[in-house]
Image (cartoon, rainbow, N blue to C red):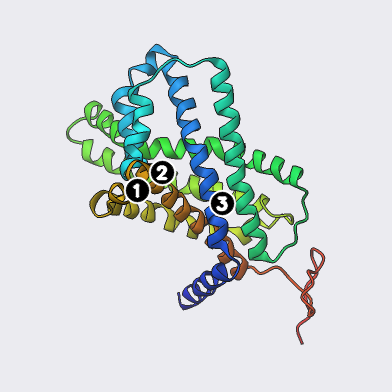
Amino acid sequence: MSRFFRLLRRASWLAVEHDQFGIAKAAAYSAILTLFPGLLLLASILAASSRTEALLPKVLAAAVGRILPGSAAATAQAYFEKTIEVSISLLITASLIALWTASGVLVSWMEGFRKAYRLPMAWGLVKERFIAFGLVIMALAPLAFATLLVAFGNQIESWIIFHSGHEFGPYILLVWKSLRWAIAILTSVAVMLVIYHFAVPRTLPWQSVLPGAALTTAIWFPVTMLFGWYVGHYAEYSLLYGSLATAIVLLVWMYILSVIVLLGAEFNAQVFPRPTSKNGAELPKGEHVATP
C-alpha cells in the first residue's frame, strides 16, 4: 500500500511536470463538442421508431439526468423531451462531427500518453487521426453498454421487483445491483485497457497498462458522483456565468475526467517504466539493461 501511494504521488507530480493539466483542457474542449451532436443523433434515431419514441419524454430524459451533473443534465434532457424529426443530411453531419471531435479527445490523450512515457511523435498526423478513429469506434459499443446499465438501472430494478416474487425479490435485486455495477466497472477497465494499449506509438503489453486502467476507473465513478453532488448542492455557476453555466459545468466535468485518464497513464509509466539505456535512449523491444 505504501508503494502504491508513493507511485501515485510521483505520478501526480509528473503529471504537473508534463503539463497533463494543459492537455486535459484540449481534450475537454473536444469532448464537449462531441456530447451534443451525439445526443442529437441518439434522440433522432430513437424518435424514428414508434416503440422507442414513447421512452423519450420520461425514461431517457431521467436516465441522462443520472449521468450528467447539475444543469448540464437539464440541458441534455431537452434533446429527449422535445424530439423533432431531422433530415438524413443533418444526422450524417452530426455523426461526422461527433466522430471527428471524439477522435480529437483521443488525439489529446495520445499526446499526454507520449509525454508520460517520454516517447517521440512517431506517427504522422494522418495516421494518428485514423488510429484515434479506430479507438473511438472500438470504445463506443462497450461504453454505451456500460452507460445504459448505469442510466437505466432503476428502471430495470423496478421491472425485476414487479416480476419477481415478494419472497425472493430483495435477493434478486441485490444480485442485480452487484452485477450491474460489476459489469459497468469491468467494461470501463476494459475500454481503458484498449486505449492505453493502442494509443502510443509503441504498443504496450496488456499487463503494463492494467494498473492505470484500474486506477482510472476507481477514481472516475466516485469523482463523477461527487462532482454532480457538489454542482447540485453548492456550486452556483449560473450566478457567475449566466446562460453559459451549462457549458462551464460540462467543461469542468470533462476536464476532470481527462485529468484522471492522463493520471492513469502517468501511473502506468511509473509501475512499468519502459526500458532505457544509461544515456536515456529507449532500448529495442525485448532488451534490458544489465544490472551490476
Residue occupied by mark 2: 247
Q: Nearer the viewer, residue 129 or 248?
A: 248
Q: Is residue 196 visible?
A: no
Q: Name the mark nearer the viewer: 1 or 2.
A: 1
3D distance between C-alphas at marks 3 and 1: 21 Å
Question: Label 1 crowding class (10 Å Cα cut-off): few <14, some 14-19, many 20+?
Answer: few
Residue 1 location (% of width, % of height)? 45, 74
Q: Nearer the viewer, residue 125 or 187?
A: 125
Which circle's residue, 2 or 3, is located before the other in the chain? 3
Give amino acid for label 2.
Ala
3D distance between C-alphas at marks 2 and 3: 15 Å
Which circle's residue, 3 or 1, is located before the other in the chain? 3
Question: Label 3 crowding class (10 Å Cα cut-off): few <14, some 14-19, many 20+?
Answer: some
Residue 149 vertical placement versus 284 (above, below): above
Residue occupied by mark 3: 26
Give amino acid for label 3.
Ala
Give SS at disc 2: helix
Residue 254 location (% of width, % of height)? 46, 49
Give SS at disc 1: helix
Give amino acid for label 1.
Tyr
As drawn, is 272 to the left or to the right of 253?
right
Which circle's residue, 1 or 2, is located before the other in the chain? 1
As drawn, is 82 to the left or to the right of 2?
left
Residue occupied by mark 1: 241
Residue 1 vertical placement versus 199 (above, below): below
Q: Residue at x 60, y 29 (%)?
A: 96
Residue 198 location (% of width, % of height)? 67, 50
